[in-house]
Image (cartoon, helix red, strand yellow):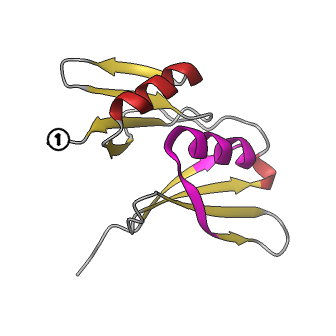
Amino acid sequence: MTRFYHYNFNVTNLQRSLEFYHRALNLSPVRTKQAEDGSFQLVFLGDEAGSDFQLELTWLRDRGEKPYDLGECEFHLAFRTDEYDTLYARHKEMGCVCYENPGMGVYFISDPDGYWIEIVPEKT
């Protein structure tokens, strides 16, 4: 049997990303790994529901603040929520909503490094 485990985003400023993901999506670190020489740090974020799937944030010391080339951003991570209206208001206030699709009932936010995250309402 094969199951989803985690997805990785490389980040230029780990603290900024941790603060963003906590504020925007209530994600918190569940485990970390750091190179002995300090050349990299991995932080795995988990959701409030305790799902097995995690978001891995990778920080590389020698990368500095040079932005990653995300191409045309034709990939994204999606979250489903039963707090859609609350999150939408929070994300608007944060200024991170980058695309809205009212016809489909979804919107996207952009993290500090430009990764897109889709917000999908829980269907009843």
Locate the C terminus and report the quarter of the image it occupies.
top left
> What is the x, y in percent for residue 11?
65, 46
Horizontal side of residue 123 vs 108, given as left or right: left
Horizontal side of residue 15 vs 75, given as left or right: right
Q: Against 98, is 74 above or below?
A: below
Q: Against 84, is 34 above or below?
A: below
Query: Which residue matches tag 1?
Result: 123
Horizontal side of residue 15 vs 53, given as left or right: right
**Could you tell me which residue is drawn at 46 percent across and 23 percent down?**
89
What crowding class fits label 1: few (fewer than 14 Cα within 10 Å), some (14-19), or many (20 or more)? few
Kindly indicate the quadrant of the structure image that contains residue 35: bottom right
Q: Is residue 34 visible in the rendered structure shown here? A: yes
Q: What residue type is labelled 1?
A: Lys
Residue occupying the far right of the picture:
37
Locate the N terminus and report the quarter of the image it occupies.
bottom left
Q: Residue 19 lies in magenta, yes or no?
A: yes
> What is the x, y in percent for residue 123?
17, 41
Residue occupying the far left of the picture:
124
**Could you tell me which residue is drawn at 71 percent across and 41 percent down?**
16
**Could you tell me which residue is drawn at 35 percent across and 43 percent down?**
78
Q: Is residue 72 visible in the rendered structure shown here? A: no
Q: Which of 91 and 31 is in front in this view?
A: 91
Q: How many marks?
A: 1
Local SS, label 1: loop
Find the magenta span and give its range. Answer: 10-31
> What is the x, y in percent for residue 107?
34, 26
Q: Residue 90 lies in magenta, yes or no?
A: no
> What is the x, y in percent for residue 51?
38, 65
